[in-house]
Image (cartoon, rainbow, N blue to C red):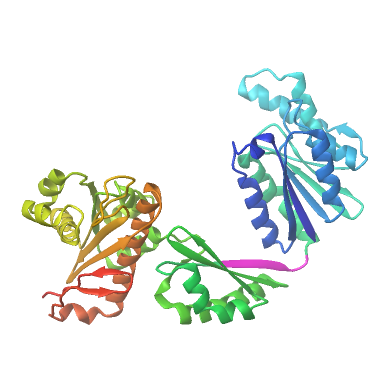
Amino acid sequence: MRAEIISVGTELLLGEIVDTNAAFLSQELAALGIELYHRTTVGDNEQRLRQALVEALSRVDLVITSGGLGPTADDLTKEVVAAVLDLPLVLHRPSLQWIEEYFARMGRKMTASNRKQALIPEGGVALPNPNGTAPGVFVRKGEQIVVCLPGPPGELMPMFRSYVRPELQKESRGVIRSRVLRLCGVGESELVERIGDFLAGQTNPTLAPLASEGEVRLRITARAQTDAEAEALNGELEAKLRARLGLLIYGTDEDTLESVVVKLLKRRGETLAVAESCTGGLLADRITDVPGASTVFDRGVVTYSNRAKMELLQVPADVIEAKGAVSPEVARFMAEGVRRVAGTDWGIGITGIAGPGGGSREKPVGLVYFALAGPGVSLVREEHWSGDRRKIKRRTTQAVLDLLRRTLLTDQECPARRRLAFSLPPVFLAGGFFIWEKKL
């Protein structure tokens, strides 16, 4: 099947509302093996909506609309669909009864305008809406299908899952399944160079990179007759990519760096505390967004001023005076200080200049130092980020989490190294300034 989505609503065109419905429907159609050809957004205008629907029906088998099913005069979706399909609107009495009962339960008076929500194109099937007043519609005309869904996502999504998806499953042949690999520590252009042969040679499954702040995603998409066949195709390509990319891949699908880090700490039975300056608590916020993080995350402190760094973390005043608050030495003292005060296995310290002011030639905006202190481990990294304040803070926390993830994985794979006693001087490595030290 070929499909098109028409999102109806002037508020969508004005950018007042983000169209999450279209993204949801796109994913659902792909999972059903239905090819989505177009996504159209049109305002609450009868003539333009009619034109969009006529064009859609000229090129696809399935049209799904979202929005425009309300009681007001500019809610015109069903009226336009009925006119384009040359079907009269008829009263669906079970829907009318549901609407009346809904208002009675809410203790509100039903107006005459709500009655029009119970009208559906003749021959269509009304789709129950337990989360609102507007029923959806599933109508077939010849070989084509038009589905009308309400605009609020809390109504559209359950309606699609409960009533539309089962019907479309009967129509579709084959499945499309996707798997997303999430990578950190590599840019999109460098990644493309590393896996250029995969990108050029893949037809089924296909492989597509997508860059976002501080990470890159690789979407693997397979088409097959069954779920098992599609998953097998995806799994085979994933295994090859993992062999090529190794630790650059931190997770799959809905994983986040913070969820992966929390999982690793739980597995090891270890705890973490963080001290932040320029990131202002963003790292702690990300970690505590993970359900169950309280089992491994002890505390986060924002030591924004020099006085706070000295009082709470025992950062020496002479170090701050000599090296400056934004320095590798202060970052290291912050990590070790918060670890010592909290009594945790791991401590993180972050200091930098997020801008837009406060920079200098020696220490420009975007300069960040972050440190990791742990059992036999002391690391400091220097980064120079570009972008606004929000982007610098986000990219810093992404890099910090990735450093902790890699350290936990490497330490887990080489447990004997904790028994080694050696000390290395500071060295420059690609991607930043590291201080690595081992102690008994």
Residue at 26% x, 53% y is 352
Quadrant where the N terminus sits is bottom right
Q: From this view, report whether residue 264 is shown above or below residue 282.
A: below
Task: State whether residue 236 appears in this view.
Answer: no
Q: In the rendered view, would you say 256 is above or below 42?
A: below
Quadrant, the C terminus: bottom left
Q: Residue at x 67, y 76 (%)?
A: 204
Tell me if residue 23 comes above or below residue 412 in the rendering: above
Instruction: Return the x and y of residue 430 as percentages of the image width and height.
Output: 32, 74
Task: Give the residue drawn at x 79%, y 59%.
Answer: 2
| Left or right relative to 261: residue 35 | right
Q: Which residues are magenta?
A: 173-179
The picture quadrant where one finds residue 257 is bottom left
Question: Viewer-proximal residue, 210 or 145?
Answer: 210
Residue 322: within the magenta? no
| Image side of residue 145 versus residue 142, left or right | left
